[in-house]
Amino acid sequence: MPQPPSPTSRKAPLLTVTGDSLVAADFNPRGGPPRPPGPYRRLFRHPGARAFTLGNLIARLPMGMFSVSAVMMIAGGRGSYALAGAVTATGLAATAVVAPWTARLVDRYGQARIAVPATVIAVCGSLALLLCVRHGAPDWTLFAAYAATATTPNTGGMSRARWAHLLGEDSEARHTANSFEQAADELCFMLGPVLAAFLCGTFFPEAGTLVGTVLLLTGVLLFAAQRSTEPPAHRRTPARSPLRAPGMPSLLAVCLATGAVFGAMEVVTIAFADAQGHRTAAGAVLALQAAGSCAAGLLYGAVRPAGPVESRLPWCVAAMAALLTLPLLAASLTGSLPLVAGALLLAGMATAPTMVTTMTLVQRRTPEGRLNEGMTLAVTGLLGGIACGSAAGGWTAEHVSATAGYGVPVAAATAALLICCTLGGPGSAAAHRTAHRP
């Protein structure tokens, strides 16, 4: 039986005569051995990885849609931005309380068993809000309906938990996975508000909420259906609460400060664009910051940073604090919105590495069997920081100036750096030695 040719065997060149010339045709492949696949291709070669990622991305996109959709729907139906802001703030506060409990149930009973009913409750809350606004229900019903959406599961955290389950102790692959997830977060929060504004403005005020609920439910159902990659449930675990794990409180404080960077930057940029007479351009300017963070996250995942992750966090936070001075300088020295936009693009490139490194540390510090809860606590810290940063940035922009408001994210990043450098902080040697997992 003839055997297939060896990949290393070479064929003799074909010789022929054309006129008075001898021509040699070599049909052997050129170049050396095939290049090894890149880190992201290797990542998605794992069975089931592409399927659960697709479902998760569909479910994650509405996370950037719901707040904008709710504000436009309530403001359009009731004519009050104050009411719209109060309702969304209530939902944020409810999420900060409910999300860790939902994540604890996910760890205890499994992602599919908890995420699907929790999503159904959240979808019912969004639809109830839509109906209340549409039919002129009392204002208090808006607060109650939007508070019900707090059961929305942390889809990003569940995806990271699946990667941790699939990749085991492969630190390089987990670094790439965390980088991809952070880039996905940035992409969804960049596209979500744009899609919501388009739907609400082009069709009808409730369109953004309606499409968001359909995407959320569809994505979670697709994600939960991928049972082969679901981490095992830990119904009874002796592990302590993630809040009591060594190094976790200070790590959550870093998340709080980093969230303040995001919240302040958004409000201050809108105020600065409005002061320059270009309020409608604020969304595009903020999208540049998210684009810079998304690109940096993908690039960070493709490289192999040297040294332990604990020692990398202070450097990442320091780079973030340094680059955040660029928008402040651009606004102070030039007052040019295009230059501020360029500065935000550069500043955004430091936020993704900081978040990737932070989430990697959260995974390492969270006790076994409580990974979803630990990562949801980190997200809760970010949400709390966003609320604080928005308030501080808005107050500074209104009572001092929009330009001075760019000092708030710089101060928040500096606070995160001080936490990292303080003895016992998340990036300190003491915390590394006392961590429960190396």
Image (cartoon, rainbow, N blue to C red):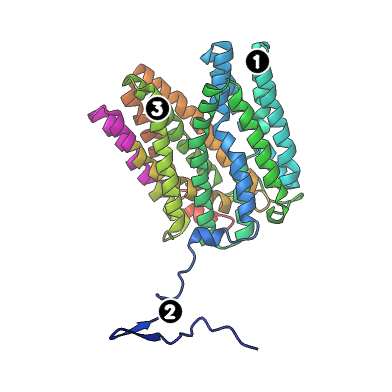
Q: Earlier in the sequence, mark 3 or mark 2?
A: 2
**Which is more foreground, mark 2 or mark 1?**
2
Rendered view: 56 above or below 19: above
Quarter where residue 2 is shown: bottom right
Give the residue type at disc 3.
Answer: Ala
Residue at the image point whose x is 43% and y is 79% from the top: 27
* Amino acid bearing label 2: Phe
Q: Nearer the viewer, mark 3 or mark 2?
A: 2
Q: Nearer the viewer, residue 235 or 297?
A: 297
Query: What crowding class fits label 2: few (fewer than 14 Cα within 10 Å), some (14-19), or many (20 or more)?
Result: few
Mark 3 or 1, which is nearer the eye?
1
Q: Which residue is mark 1?
A: 134
The disc labelled 1 sits on which kind of residue?
Answer: Arg
Q: Which residue is mark 3?
A: 282
User: Which range is magenta?
Assistant: 317-342
Q: Main secondary structure of the magenta part?
A: helix
Q: Which callout, 3 or 1, points at the residue further toward the start of the chain?
A: 1
Residue 120, picture quadrant: top right
Magenta-span inclusion, residue 319: yes
Instruction: Examine the structure image and report whether residue 196 is included in the region drawn in magenta.
Output: no
Disc with the residue nearer the chain's start (2 vs 1): 2
Distance in Å between CA atoms under marks 2 and 1: 70 Å
User: Which residue lies under the disc numbered 2?
Assistant: 27
CA distance separating discs 3 and 1: 29 Å
Q: Compared to 419, does 339 lie above or below?
A: above
Which residue appears farthest toward the front when viewing the image? 19
Where is residue 399? Give x, y as percent.
36, 17
